[in-house]
């Protein structure tokens, strides 16, 4: 085989039923390399001896090529003799072969029923763990009602500040923008029929009954739920929860209940605040785009919103607060004992919280429709 002196080359010769392959030239992984399939052609020798000729600089491409020859020999049932190669090349080729043999390929043997069964089993396990955690929280809360002096009020007040007052900026921004967007979208349609004033009705009802509580809950699921999971998960990684259990202190009573009470109390207040900002966003759009005076907008909002609308939104926010706190604390307690586990727990807390919020809102929608609320 003729090639330039600086290129990687393979020269072959037959010695009886043995093929001698002499590797020479400069072997760089960025340069074109001779294909072993083209070199061997249709020949099927019983043994292949690999040797080095005028070899220049080489890198991992030479090791990979030797491994390719060994793999071809193994598949063809031929003997591969690499004893003439330097020990460095032989050792690296052996490591490469070992690494490829220990790699576990993806199992494509499962059919659709098996995949569905595994998913259903995992869902059942998650449901069981969630129900067990709810039961522990309920029993701990009942125990604290009998002995309220054991409740950690200082931790509860600290969490109230973190998930309540510290969340006001992001809740304000999101709620105001949601009100603005809804008013703009409603104005585009309603002004075609000369019903500009009904923008107040649409924005008021949508914000008070749905968007205010839900957006506040989603914001806190991403902010506070993830924080709960990261805090408790970090404590589990540092074996602080094991220390509490060794001292006879229940982690649910010590860590979960203060956070659960704090978020349950603050979520309705944040929902009311989100409602006010959403209505103000719609009022701003009506005054600037539709030329509706703020006083007329406010009067129209008062005529369409009654106590049942506000109460339904507050009830939703109360349940949403329980869901966010429960999801965050549960994922924190289920966290693996590693730094990656803490991140996975925080991510899982956000996903679980938002999923359960949407599911609970759908249940509320059906229930309120049945009750005529």
Image (tube, grey):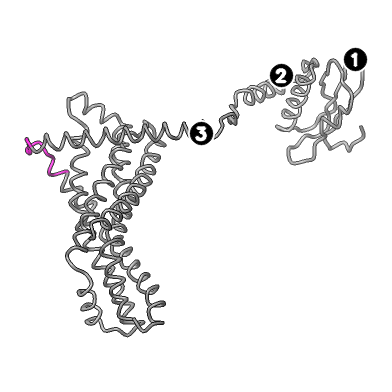
Q: Quadrant of residue 134?
A: top left
Above-or-below relation of 289 to 361: below
Q: Are marks 2 and 3 in contact (CB under 8 Å)?
A: no
Identify the image quadrant of the C terminus: bottom left
> Toward the viewer: 120 or 278?
120
Q: Earlier in the sequence, mark 2 or mark 3?
A: 2
Dominant secondary structure of the magenta stretch? Answer: helix
Determine the CA span between mark 1 and mark 2. 26 Å
Give the residue at mark 3.
115
> Which circle, 2 or 3, is nearer the viewer?
3
Who comes first in sequence, dot 1 or dot 2?
A: 1
Relative image position of residue 334 (x, y in whole percent) = 33, 33
Q: Position of residue 167 (x, y in %)?
A: 26, 56
Cα gap from disc 2 to disc 3, whole angstroms: 47 Å
Q: Nearer the viewer, residue 233 or 323?
A: 323
**Dot 3: what SS?**
helix
**Which disc, if any, is residue 87?**
2
Q: Which mark is residue 17?
A: 1
Mark 1 or mark 3, earlier in chain: 1
Magenta run includes residue 149: yes
**Mark 1 neighbour class, 10 Å CA radius: few under 14, some 14 to 19, many 20 or more:** few
Q: Nearer the viewer, mark 1 or mark 3?
A: 3
């Amino acid at each position: 085989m003729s090639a330039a002196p600086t290129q990687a080359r393979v020269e072959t010769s037959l010695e009886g039923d043995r093929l001698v392959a002499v590797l020479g030239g400069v072997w760089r992984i960025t340069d074109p390399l001779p294909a072993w399939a083209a070199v061997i052609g249709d020949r099927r020798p019983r043994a292949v001896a690999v040797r080095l000729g005028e070899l220049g600089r080489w890198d991992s491409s030479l090791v990979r090529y030797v491994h390719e020859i060994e793999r071809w020999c193994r598949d063809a049932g031929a003997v591969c003799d690499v004893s003439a190669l330097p020990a460095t090349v032989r050792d690296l080729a052996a490591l490469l072969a070992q690494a490829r043999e220990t790699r576990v390929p993806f199992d494509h043997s499962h059919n659709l029923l098996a995949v569905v069964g595994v998913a259903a089993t995992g869902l059942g396990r998650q449901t069981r763990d969630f129900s067990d955690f709810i039961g522990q929280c309920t029993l701990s809360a009942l125990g604290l009602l009998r002995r309220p002096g054991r409740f950690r009020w200082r931790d509860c007040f600290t969490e109230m500040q973190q998930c309540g007052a510290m969340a006001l900026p992001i809740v304000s921004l999101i709620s105001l923008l949601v009100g603005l967007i809804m008013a703009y979208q409603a104005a585009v349609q309603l002004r075609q029929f000369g019903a500009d004033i009904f923008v107040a009705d649409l924005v008021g009802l949508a914000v008070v009954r749905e968007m205010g509580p839900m957006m506040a809950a989603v914001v806190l699921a991403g902010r506070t739920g993830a924080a709960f999971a990261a805090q408790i998960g970090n404590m589990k990684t540092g074996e602080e929860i094991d220390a509490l259990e060794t001292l006879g202190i229940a982690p649910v009573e010590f860590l979960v209940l203060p956070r659960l009470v704090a978020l349950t109390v603050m979520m309705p207040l944040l929902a009311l605040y989100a409602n006010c900002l959403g209505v103000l966003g719609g009022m701003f759009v009506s005054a600037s785009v539709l030329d509706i005076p703020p006083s007329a907008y406010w009067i129209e909002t008062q005529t369409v919103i009654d106590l049942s609308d506000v109460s339904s939104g507050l009830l939703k926010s109360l349940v949403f607060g329980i869901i966010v706190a429960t999801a965050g604390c549960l994922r924190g307690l289920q966290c693996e004992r590693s730094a990656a586990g803490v991140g996975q727990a925080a991510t899982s807390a956000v996903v679980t919280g938002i999923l359960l919020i949407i599911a609970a809102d759908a249940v509320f929608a059906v229930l309120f429709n049945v009750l005529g609320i």
